[in-house]
Amino acid sequence: MAKKESQPKQLFEREYVVPLRRGWLKVPKYKRGNKAVKTLKEFIARHMKIYDRDLNKVKIDVNLNNELRFRGIKKPPAKIKVRARKFDNDFVNVELVNLHTHIQFKIKREERLKKKEEKKQEVKEEKKKVDVEDFKKIEEVKKEDSIEKIKKKI
Protein backbone atom coordinates (compact mmCIF):
# COMPACT_ATOMS: atom_id res chain seq x y z
CA MET A 1 0.00 0.00 0.00
CA ALA A 2 1.07 3.56 -0.57
CA LYS A 3 2.00 5.55 2.48
CA LYS A 4 -0.38 8.33 3.35
CA GLU A 5 1.47 11.62 3.45
CA SER A 6 0.63 13.81 6.40
CA GLN A 7 -1.42 16.82 5.39
CA PRO A 8 -0.21 20.21 6.59
CA LYS A 9 -2.09 21.41 9.64
CA GLN A 10 -4.51 24.29 9.07
CA LEU A 11 -3.72 27.12 11.46
CA PHE A 12 -6.66 29.43 10.78
CA GLU A 13 -9.26 30.49 8.24
CA ARG A 14 -10.60 33.96 7.46
CA GLU A 15 -13.01 35.58 5.05
CA TYR A 16 -12.24 38.88 3.36
CA VAL A 17 -13.84 41.24 0.90
CA VAL A 18 -10.84 42.27 -1.17
CA PRO A 19 -10.95 45.68 -2.89
CA LEU A 20 -9.39 45.08 -6.30
CA ARG A 21 -10.30 48.34 -8.02
CA ARG A 22 -7.71 50.25 -6.04
CA GLY A 23 -5.01 48.15 -7.66
CA TRP A 24 -6.17 47.71 -11.23
CA LEU A 25 -7.09 51.37 -11.86
CA LYS A 26 -3.37 52.24 -11.82
CA VAL A 27 -2.49 50.17 -14.90
CA PRO A 28 -3.57 50.17 -18.57
CA LYS A 29 -6.72 48.29 -19.54
CA TYR A 30 -4.90 45.37 -21.15
CA LYS A 31 -3.06 44.61 -17.87
CA ARG A 32 -5.99 44.93 -15.46
CA GLY A 33 -6.79 41.22 -15.08
CA ASN A 34 -3.21 40.35 -14.19
CA LYS A 35 -3.01 43.30 -11.79
CA ALA A 36 -6.24 42.16 -10.09
CA VAL A 37 -4.69 38.75 -9.38
CA LYS A 38 -1.51 40.37 -8.09
CA THR A 39 -3.50 42.79 -5.93
CA LEU A 40 -5.44 39.88 -4.44
CA LYS A 41 -2.22 38.01 -3.63
CA GLU A 42 -0.64 41.10 -2.06
CA PHE A 43 -3.74 41.71 0.08
CA ILE A 44 -3.77 38.10 1.31
CA ALA A 45 -0.02 38.10 1.98
CA ARG A 46 -0.41 41.25 4.09
CA HIS A 47 -3.47 40.16 6.05
CA MET A 48 -2.56 36.50 6.58
CA LYS A 49 0.86 37.51 7.97
CA ILE A 50 3.21 35.96 5.46
CA TYR A 51 6.28 37.66 6.87
CA ASP A 52 8.47 37.68 3.76
CA ARG A 53 5.44 38.73 1.63
CA ASP A 54 6.26 36.00 -0.90
CA LEU A 55 3.41 35.92 -3.42
CA ASN A 56 4.35 32.38 -4.45
CA LYS A 57 3.07 31.18 -1.07
CA VAL A 58 -0.45 32.36 -1.92
CA LYS A 59 -2.31 29.78 -4.01
CA ILE A 60 -5.48 30.84 -5.81
CA ASP A 61 -8.26 28.31 -6.45
CA VAL A 62 -9.24 27.58 -10.06
CA ASN A 63 -12.80 28.81 -9.53
CA LEU A 64 -11.57 32.07 -8.02
CA ASN A 65 -9.23 32.61 -10.96
CA ASN A 66 -12.09 31.94 -13.38
CA GLU A 67 -14.27 34.44 -11.52
CA LEU A 68 -11.55 37.11 -11.67
CA ARG A 69 -11.16 36.64 -15.43
CA PHE A 70 -14.83 35.98 -16.24
CA ARG A 71 -15.48 39.35 -17.90
CA GLY A 72 -12.10 39.41 -19.60
CA ILE A 73 -8.76 40.98 -18.84
CA LYS A 74 -9.95 44.54 -19.39
CA LYS A 75 -12.76 44.54 -16.82
CA PRO A 76 -12.09 42.49 -13.67
CA PRO A 77 -14.45 42.77 -10.67
CA ALA A 78 -14.06 45.74 -8.35
CA LYS A 79 -14.16 43.62 -5.20
CA ILE A 80 -14.49 39.96 -4.41
CA LYS A 81 -15.31 37.89 -1.32
CA VAL A 82 -12.76 35.17 -0.59
CA ARG A 83 -11.93 32.59 2.08
CA ALA A 84 -8.25 32.23 2.98
CA ARG A 85 -6.79 29.25 4.85
CA LYS A 86 -3.29 29.38 6.27
CA PHE A 87 -1.38 26.15 6.87
CA ASP A 88 1.59 25.44 9.13
CA ASN A 89 4.03 25.44 6.19
CA ASP A 90 3.22 29.16 5.57
CA PHE A 91 1.16 28.49 2.45
CA VAL A 92 -2.22 30.16 2.05
CA ASN A 93 -5.02 28.73 -0.09
CA VAL A 94 -7.54 31.27 -1.34
CA GLU A 95 -10.95 30.25 -2.66
CA LEU A 96 -14.18 31.93 -3.64
CA VAL A 97 -16.81 32.08 -0.88
CA ASN A 98 -20.01 32.20 -2.92
CA LEU A 99 -19.82 29.80 -5.83
CA HIS A 100 -22.53 29.94 -8.47
CA THR A 101 -24.89 26.97 -8.39
CA HIS A 102 -23.85 25.67 -11.82
CA ILE A 103 -20.22 25.64 -10.66
CA GLN A 104 -21.17 23.79 -7.46
CA PHE A 105 -22.96 21.12 -9.51
CA LYS A 106 -19.98 20.86 -11.84
CA ILE A 107 -17.60 20.31 -8.90
CA LYS A 108 -19.86 17.64 -7.37
CA ARG A 109 -20.14 15.87 -10.73
CA GLU A 110 -16.36 15.85 -11.12
CA GLU A 111 -15.97 14.39 -7.62
CA ARG A 112 -18.49 11.63 -8.42
CA LEU A 113 -16.70 10.81 -11.67
CA LYS A 114 -13.38 10.73 -9.85
CA LYS A 115 -14.74 8.27 -7.27
CA LYS A 116 -16.13 6.05 -10.06
CA GLU A 117 -12.75 6.05 -11.81
CA GLU A 118 -11.01 5.10 -8.54
CA LYS A 119 -13.43 2.20 -8.03
CA LYS A 120 -12.88 1.03 -11.61
CA GLN A 121 -9.13 1.21 -11.07
CA GLU A 122 -9.40 -0.83 -7.84
CA VAL A 123 -11.51 -3.50 -9.58
CA LYS A 124 -9.03 -3.60 -12.45
CA GLU A 125 -6.10 -4.07 -10.03
CA GLU A 126 -7.94 -6.87 -8.19
CA LYS A 127 -8.72 -8.58 -11.48
CA LYS A 128 -5.09 -8.28 -12.49
CA LYS A 129 -4.00 -9.89 -9.20
CA VAL A 130 -6.44 -12.76 -9.77
CA ASP A 131 -5.16 -13.20 -13.34
CA VAL A 132 -1.56 -13.38 -12.09
CA GLU A 133 -2.49 -16.00 -9.49
CA ASP A 134 -4.36 -18.04 -12.12
CA PHE A 135 -1.39 -17.80 -14.45
CA LYS A 136 0.92 -19.12 -11.72
CA LYS A 137 -1.42 -22.06 -11.09
CA ILE A 138 -1.56 -22.87 -14.80
CA GLU A 139 2.24 -22.79 -15.01
CA GLU A 140 2.49 -25.20 -12.06
CA VAL A 141 0.03 -27.58 -13.70
CA LYS A 142 2.00 -27.45 -16.97
CA LYS A 143 5.23 -28.25 -15.12
CA GLU A 144 3.58 -31.20 -13.38
CA ASP A 145 2.17 -32.49 -16.70
CA SER A 146 5.55 -32.18 -18.41
CA ILE A 147 7.26 -34.07 -15.54
CA GLU A 148 4.68 -36.87 -15.80
CA LYS A 149 5.20 -37.14 -19.58
CA ILE A 150 8.97 -37.36 -19.11
CA LYS A 151 8.53 -40.09 -16.50
CA LYS A 152 6.27 -42.08 -18.88
CA LYS A 153 8.89 -41.91 -21.65
CA ILE A 154 11.57 -43.26 -19.31
Image (cartoon, rainbow, N blue to C red):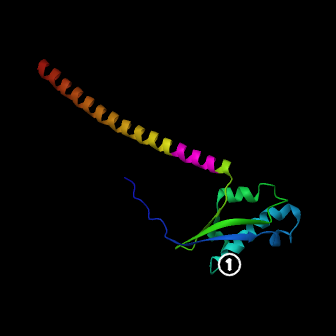
Where residue 50 sits in the image (x, y, percent)? 62, 78
Which residue in the rendered view is the most extreme toward the bottom?
51
Report which quarter residue 78 is drawn in.
bottom right
Residue range highlighted in magenta: 104-114
Secondary structure state at the residue bearing disc 1: helix
Q: In this picture, is 46 found above or below 110?
A: below
Observer-nearest of 133 and 101: 101
Using a 10 Å C-alpha cutoff, classify the residue at mark 1 as few (fewer than 14 neighbours), some (14 to 19) or many (20 or more): some
Is 26 left or right of 87, judged from the image as shown?
right
Name the magenta segment's main secondary structure. helix
Query: What's the amino acid at mark 1?
Result: Arg
Name the residue that disc number 1 marks: 46
In the figure, residue 41 lies in which quadrant?
Answer: bottom right
Q: Is residue 1 magenta?
A: no
Tell me residue 148's x, y (percent).
15, 23
* Quarter where residue 79 is shown: bottom right
Q: How many marks?
A: 1
- Quadrant for the C terminus, please: top left
As drawn, is 101 to the left or to the right of 85?
right
Looking at this view, is 87 or 4 the one in front? 87
Residue 96, x across and y down, in percent: 66, 61
